[in-house]
Image (cartoon, helix red, strand yellow):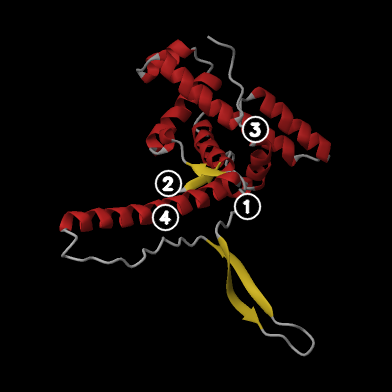
Amino acid sequence: MPLLAPGNRWTRDEIVYHAAGFYYERLNQDPDFREALSNLFNRLDGPLPEDGRQEAIRDFCSTWPLPARAPEDLLWSHELRPWQGDRLVTGGLSGFVPTPGLPVVTGTIPGDGDTPSLRIVERQPWIFPSVPLPFTYDPLTHDRRWLRDRIDAICADIRSSILAQAEALEREVEQAGWGPLPPAWHDPDSLRQAVDRLYLRAIRRMSWSRVAIKARTRRSAVQEQVTRLASLLGITLPPLG
């Protein structure tokens, strides 16, 4: 599974997909979970009607604190059982990739007889920096300080025009549901650490204090980190403890 790259933009579904994958990796190391998963897969192997399969999945998810996307992942993992054994893995990920920018004609399809030719148009994220106008520089009336000020003003105008167009392109993709990766996710080790703490709280049902002691950090920091991750994944945590 590829790691999240902080320089890119991600949809919420993509972030959930990767976080769930880390969580499943941790669950697959738990013997009790692996045994329960094996029993579920054995049940799904039986002659169950579709509503019976769905009921088995719901029963499993009500017993184990799993992400909201877990039902489809369980069915996918069951299909892969002959090749990967009794393991829970993430299934597919689909989504719309936005194409910000202005429409650009990239080609044409010639017409034939009464059929008109067609233009091929696609949106491309071009930036058009402002172009400075010519100006006069008369050494008899101007000095280098005046010239440097004029250069600075031109450069500032170009910079401003580039940033304004970049922000407009960013708004387009953000309106489509794509945003920057949260800072706390930039380091894969930090994400795995958060997943381990979520596992201790959700699966092992450790109190916040015990999780904090094990993590060697403040209870409030652990509680905030784990609660945020659980909310993202759609995992219900045990009552406060």
Q: Nearer the viewer, mark 2 or mark 4?
A: 4
Q: Amino acid at mark 1?
A: Phe
Looking at the picture, does residue 229 appear above or below residue 49?
above
Q: Secondary structure at mark 4?
A: helix
Of badges 1 and 4, nearer the viewer stands 4
Q: Taking the image as drawn, is residue 1 in sight? A: no
- Between marks 1 and 3, how big is the CA–CA gap? 20 Å
Between disc 1 and disc 4, whose residue precedes? 1
Q: Is residue 83 above or below residue 128?
A: above
Give the residue at mark 3: 68
Per the model, the C-alpha gap separating discs 2 and 4 is 24 Å
- Residue at image mark 1: 96
Q: Amino acid at mark 4?
A: Ile
- Across the whole image, how many numbered discs are drawn on residues? 4
Q: Tags 2 and 1 in contact by the CB under 8 Å rule?
A: no
- Separation (CA) of disc 2 from disc 3: 24 Å
Q: Position of residue 49 (x, y in %)?
A: 83, 39
Q: Which dot, 1 or 3, sits closer to the camera?
A: 1
Does residue 193 appear to the left or right of 147 in the view shown? right
